[in-house]
Amino acid sequence: MKLAFELPPAQAEKLRAEAERLGLLPEDLARAALTDLLATPDANFRAAAGRVLTKNEELYKRLA
């Protein structure tokens, strides 16, 4: 998928500066940041998964 959008000047400058500091193109840094964001489960999912793991801890031990 190809995306195009406008950043406010202050955000664009921050992106350029951070990309330069890391030796990356701004487009590559934005792509990496978006990839990382989409790969990270949200807080609600982590909380629910934690409750399930805690609730079933004894069962998991017996099944192991």
Image (cartoon, helix red, strand yellow):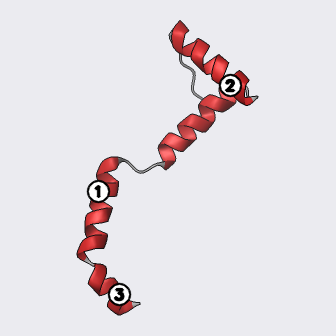
Please indicate, yes or no, whether residue 6 appears anywhere in the rendered image.
no
Which percent across, then down, holds residue 4? 57, 21
Residue 43 in the figure: left or right of residue 7: left
Q: Earlier in the sequence, mark 3 or mark 1?
A: 1
Dots 3 and 1: beta carbons under 8 Å?
no
Residue for badge 3: 61
* Secondary element at image label 1: helix
Q: Which residue is mark 2?
A: 19
Return the disc, 3 or 2, that comes first in the chain's sequence: 2
Along the polypeptide, which appears first: circle 2 or circle 1? 2
- How many neighbours does mark 3 have within 10 angstroms: few (below 14), some (14-19), or many (20 or more)? few
Q: Where, quadrant-wise, is the N terminus in this rendering?
A: top right
Residue type at mark 1 is: Ala
Q: Which residue is mark 1?
A: 47
- Count of numbered circles in the view: 3
Q: CA distance from mark 2 to mark 1?
A: 33 Å
